[in-house]
């Protein structure tokens, strides 16, 4: 059940990031590239680029800071924190760490530059769906 919730959250966040990235690229980069030439490399060559929309993730951080509820949890930085600001490790992560520590078959070598192939395949399947055509995804 927790995995399904994580998958739904992951899908929602992936869509949000793709939408935000597309918006920023279309609104800012198009104008910047249309006004810059190779000979115009002065420090002010970006002065004509309009300010983009507020960053959605930083907006969550600002909302967290202004919230006065003592039960608030900051989830925008990629780590849960306790009331003293120290990282709070999810019990599922602790259990996974324990399992890795006692398993003598776990490879402790550095992964290759492209990452662990099995992990990358599983992560891509999780992020884009196991039926996604990976040949049509940029950077895959």
Image (cartoon, rainbow, N blue to C red):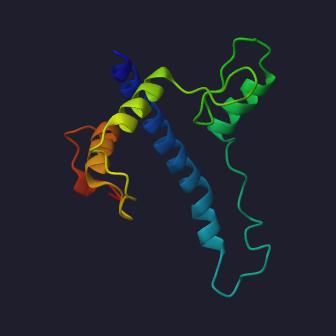
Name the spot of residue 28 as percent of width and height, x first: 62, 57
Determine the residue positioned at 37% across, 58% down: 111
Whole-percent x, y for residue 81 in the image: 66, 27
Left or right of 29, for residue 135 = left
Residue 129's place in the image compared with 115, above or below, is above
Front one among 8 and 21: 8
Q: Quadrant of the C terminus?
A: bottom left
Q: Position of residue 35 (x, y in %)?
A: 66, 73
- Name the residue located 19 percent from the left edge and 40 percent from the top edge: 131
The image quadrant of residue 37 is: bottom right
Between residue 48 and residue 136, name the one nearer to us. Answer: 136
Query: Is 74 in front, or is 81?
Result: 81
Q: Say which quarter of the image contains residue 4.
A: top left
- Number of marks present in the image shown: 0
Q: Position of residue 23 (x, y in %)?
A: 55, 47
- Vertical side of 101 occupied by 34: above or below: below
Q: Residue furthest bottom?
A: 39
Residue at left offset 65%, top offset 20%: 73
- Would residue 56 be found to the left or right of residue 140 on screen? right
Q: Residue at x 50, y 49 (%)?
A: 22
> Which quadrant of the figure has residue 2?
top left
In this image, 25 relative to 38: left or right? left
Screen quadrant of the N terminus: top left
* Of 124 and 102, the residue lying toward us: 102
Q: Is residue 126 left or right of residue 80?
A: left
């Amino acid at each position: 059940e927790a995995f399904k919730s994580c998958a739904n959250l992951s899908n929602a966040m992936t869509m949000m990031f793709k939408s935000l990235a597309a918006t920023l690229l279309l609104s800012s980069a198009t104008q910047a590239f249309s006004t810059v030439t190779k000979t115009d490399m002065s420090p002010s060559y970006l002065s004509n680029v309009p300010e983009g929309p507020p960053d959605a993730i930083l907006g969550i951080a600002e909302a967290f800071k202004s919230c006065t509820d003592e039960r608030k949890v900051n989830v925008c930085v990629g780590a849960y924190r306790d009331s003293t600001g120290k990282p709070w490790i999810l019990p599922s992560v602790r259990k996974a760490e324990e399992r890795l520590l006692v398993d003598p078959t776990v490879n402790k070598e550095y992964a290759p530059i492209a990452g662990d192939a099995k992990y990358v395949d599983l992560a891509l399947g999780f992020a884009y769906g196991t039926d996604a055509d990976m040949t049509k995804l940029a950077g895959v």
